[in-house]
């Protein structure tokens, strides 16, 4: 009887080991087709992100494929974060400023008049993730895995009137805004902020319901705004751009070798994005001019007055976070950022 029992137990253990081995092997060989929701239209402005997707596919020998749906086809810019966290889609390009009540820390990377360049914004973001756990904790809370962030090109004003290069010229004008802070900046200039999605700007300028767009150079070109807004003025400011995130359960289902490849390509994409953005801004400005548009610098005197009239929005953020019980962490963020951006 004992011999029979021993044989039965041994067989059960062997079956369990074989099942575990088969399961591990199946996971290692599994294919993943990921639904990636993007709020922007397809175009050369997203070259680095598409390159990231292609390289991951190549390195995994087709085990990972990305189906990117553009122009809000899988959800608008204000919906994709929740959709990704719930698993409705696998990945998304998420604008932190569109989620002021969910991304309390990440939205700070889109506070105006903090960063001198897009590259500096990325440098500050990376230091924040390394030194302040609240940034990663916020990703975990939203049930997403962070990949990399777009170094958003500097923002410019674009419209049919050539007077966007001075405070007097934009006073009283309807200017595109988004998030919680950009409207305050627009108001500080004596203009009227209007929240309008990127894909709606062209028609708004064409109809006259918007006097000036407020957008980065790449998106000015990608959306052909120079056709309805001949004059572009700036740069006005630099912000952190959208970030690429993946559903946490999707990420956790992937075997370690695929996770390693995706993380490695994300690091490469982050570095390449900065160099690409700097080069692309200059090339795009020249392309806008070649297409008949005009690019004018904003008055230095006017910019100094504009910044002086705008509240210290980083401190405003700290004060708001203090009311939410996050004052200590927020103060650490502000101290780090002020040190890193000190002239």
Image (spheres, rainbow, N blue to C red):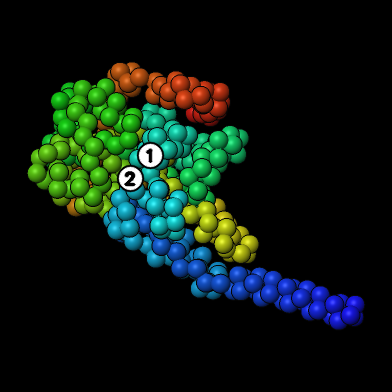
Q: Determine the image quadrant of residue 313.
A: top left
Q: Nearer the viewer, residue 303 or 66?
A: 66
Disc 1 on helix, strand or loop?
loop
Asked if labels 2 and 1 touch by Cβ distance under 8 angstroms, the answer is yes
Q: Position of residue 66 (x, y in %)?
A: 43, 65
Image quadrant in which the N terminus is located: bottom right
The residues tagged by marks 1 and 2 sit, at their Cα atoms, a distance apart of 7 Å
| Mark identifier at residue 282 | none
Residue beneath the point at 22% across and 41% down? 196
Q: Is residue 175 left or right of residue 45?
A: left
Reading the image, the residue beneath label 1 is 99
At horizontal 51% and vertical 42% (from top left) the residue drawn is 141
Q: Position of residue 55 (x, y in %)?
A: 50, 65
**Residue holding disc 2:** 78
Q: Say if 218 sits above or below 340 in the image.
A: below
Q: Is 86 left, or right, of 302 in this rendering?
A: right
Q: Residue furthest front?
A: 1
Looking at the image, which is closer to me, 341 or 318? 318
Nearest to N terminus: mark 1 or mark 2: 2
Q: Outermost residue toward the right?
A: 2
Is residue 24 visible in this depiction of the protein? yes
256 left or right of 10 in image? left
Which residue is found at the position 33% from the left and 45% from the top? 78
* Residue 110, image x, y percentages: 40, 35
- Please say whether residue 274 is visible from this viewpoint: no
């Amino acid at each position: 009887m004992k011999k029979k029992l021993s044989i039965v137990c041994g067989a059960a253990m062997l079956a369990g080991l074989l099942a575990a081995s088969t399961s591990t092997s199946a996971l290692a060989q599994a294919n993943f087709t990921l639904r990636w929701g993007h709020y922007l239209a397809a175009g050369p402005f997203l070259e680095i992100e598409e390159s990231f997707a292609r390289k991951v596919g190549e390195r995994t020998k087709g085990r990972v494929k990305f189906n990117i749906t553009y122009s809000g086809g899988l959800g608008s810019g204000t919906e994709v974060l929740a959709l990704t966290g719930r698993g409705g889609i696998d990945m998304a390009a998420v604008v932190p400023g569109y989620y002021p009540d969910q991304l309390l820390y990440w939205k700070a990377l889109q506070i105006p008049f903090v960063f001198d360049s897009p590259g500096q914004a990325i440098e500050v973001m990376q230091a924040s993730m390394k030194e302040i756990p609240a940034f990663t904790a916020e990703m975990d809370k939203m049930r997403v895995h962070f990949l990399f962030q777009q170094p958003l090109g500097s923002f410019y004003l674009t419209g049919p009137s050539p007077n966007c290069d001075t405070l007097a010229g934009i006073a009283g004008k309807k200017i595109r805004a988004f998030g919680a802070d950009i409207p305050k900046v627009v108001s500080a200039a004596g203009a009227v902020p209007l929240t309008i999605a990127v894909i709606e700007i062209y028609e708004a300028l064409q109809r006259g319901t918007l006097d000036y767009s407020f957008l980065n150079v790449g998106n000015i070109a990608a959306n052909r705004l120079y056709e309805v807004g001949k004059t572009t003025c700036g740069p006005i400011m630099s912000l952190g751009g959208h970030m690429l995130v993946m559903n946490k359960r999707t990420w956790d289902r992937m075997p370690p070798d695929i996770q390693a490849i995706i993380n490695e390509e994300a690091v490469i994409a982050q570095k390449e994005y900065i160099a690409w953005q700097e080069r692309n801004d200059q090339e795009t400005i020249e392309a806008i001019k070649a297409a008949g548009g005009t690019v004018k610098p904003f008055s230095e005197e006017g910019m100094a007055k504009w910044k002086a009239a705008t509240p210290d929005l980083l401190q405003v953020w700290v004060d708001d976070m203090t009311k939410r019980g996050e004052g200590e962490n927020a103060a650490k963020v502000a101290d780090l950022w002020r040190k890193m951006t000190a002239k």
